[in-house]
Image: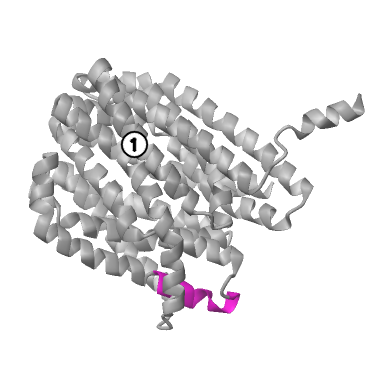
Amino acid sequence: MKLLKSLSLYTISGLSSKAAGFLILPIVANEVGKDNMGILGLIYSITGVVAPLILLSASAAISVEYYREDHGKSNFSSYLSSSLMNPLLSFGIFILLFLIFGKYLAQTIGLDPKWMPVIPFYCLAILIPSIISVIYQVTNQPFKHLTFNISMTLLEMALAILFVLALKWNYEGRVWSIIGSKAIFTGIGLYLLYRSGLLTRKISKVYRHDAWKFALPLIPTYVASSVVNFSDRIFISSMETLGDLGMYEVGYKIGSVVLILQSALALAWMPFLYELIKRDTEQARRKIVQYSYAGMIGFLVAALGVTLLAPLAFYLFKPEYQGGIIYVFWVALAYSFFGCYSLRVGFVLYFKRNIYLTYLAFIKITLNLVLNYFLIKYYGVIGAAYATAISFFIEFVIIHFMAQYIQPLPWFYFLNRSKKEN
């Protein structure tokens, strides 16, 4: 019941965020047109690649430290504050790199060079809000999590309407609405951390090194996930047209509604899972199996539901976007596999076998790039959606066996029980 209660609140939080994004999506898409939606897709994608390299999994390291208490409960605030130093250093490096080489990279991917110095600020603005969310998650405060994220989402919506519709800033207004809302809530988040005593001047090199050691094997993992989202846009823009990319972007966004369930479950699942792992009993392992089966079925049902409801969503868009509906099923299916992945990856993180995720990342990147090239070449834009679904499925299968190797679970315990009863 504890999991279900938390899940319901996190679902509302995730739903509000995603629902706001989808309410804004048709407004922005209809206002800026297909080509500019394609440009937005490129900005989102390159930000997705750079963000893991700047954020350095600080929030994940903080979450795991809270449960494991490797450095003592009394030192948690020092660990958190020390962990923030790594992203700040990385941010400075990327600002320098993008000022020097950003023009050449922008020309390569077909993006206006003026956005390159902005992207590190975009990424850094994610840091503090994500850590506040993690703090509310690990301390089991879903109401505060809900309040914080809904408030940030409402501000983002208001700024998007102001910048895109009222001020006519075109697609640029959408970018600045995201950066602006997160920057404001970065200030709020810093105040909340300071008030709660979690922000301290006690910076430890040992803790910084520990957070860096935790993050290093995860960087390829997050980059791989971003490459999956980034590479299809690049292949489409180079092998098809910018208008096709804009239409794909809309279909992709609608298909990714499954992420509402995934992100909500991940927030409720990780604390629940870590507590069960710590118990280390047969009953706890069976409980993990039961909830995992329920989650996997739920993700597949969600993918089917999104696909069936997609035609209703497309009524909100101009006719030029209607072709994007064919991508919804495959993207929704891909994210249902990603949801299943998120049920299993916690074992790797808890036992700090993060190097396994590095190996998986290289497999995923290589597989996705190859699939995108050949499937888009032979099937057109829909091939990108095929590549995404296949990549996420294989990733789930591999992480399942990795997690099973780390901590074996009795996936078929009910069959053994039936045999004993007979």
Give 88 or 311, whichever is nearer the viewer: 88
Residue 135 can be seen in this image: no
- Residue at 44%, 43% in the rendered image: 360
Please tell me whether mark 1 sits on a helix, a strand or a loop: helix
Three-letter code, disc 1: Thr
Query: What percent of the width, then of the height, locates residue 187?
Result: 32, 68
Task: Name the residue at 48% across, 32% down.
Answer: 337
Q: Report the residue marked by disc 1.
A: 366
Question: In the image, 95: left or right of 9?
Answer: left
- Magenta span dominant secondary structure: helix
Could you say where residue 96 lies in the image, as x and y percent from the top left?
16, 64
**Residue 159 sits above or below residue 410 on the image:** below
Q: Nearer the viewer, residue 384 or 199?
A: 384
Q: Which residues lie in the magenta part?
A: 72-83
Query: How many C-alpha atoms fall within 10 Å of the one at disc 1: few (<14), some, or many (≥20)?
Result: some
Report if residue 224 is visible in the image: yes
Single out the residue that lies furthest toward the bottom: 202
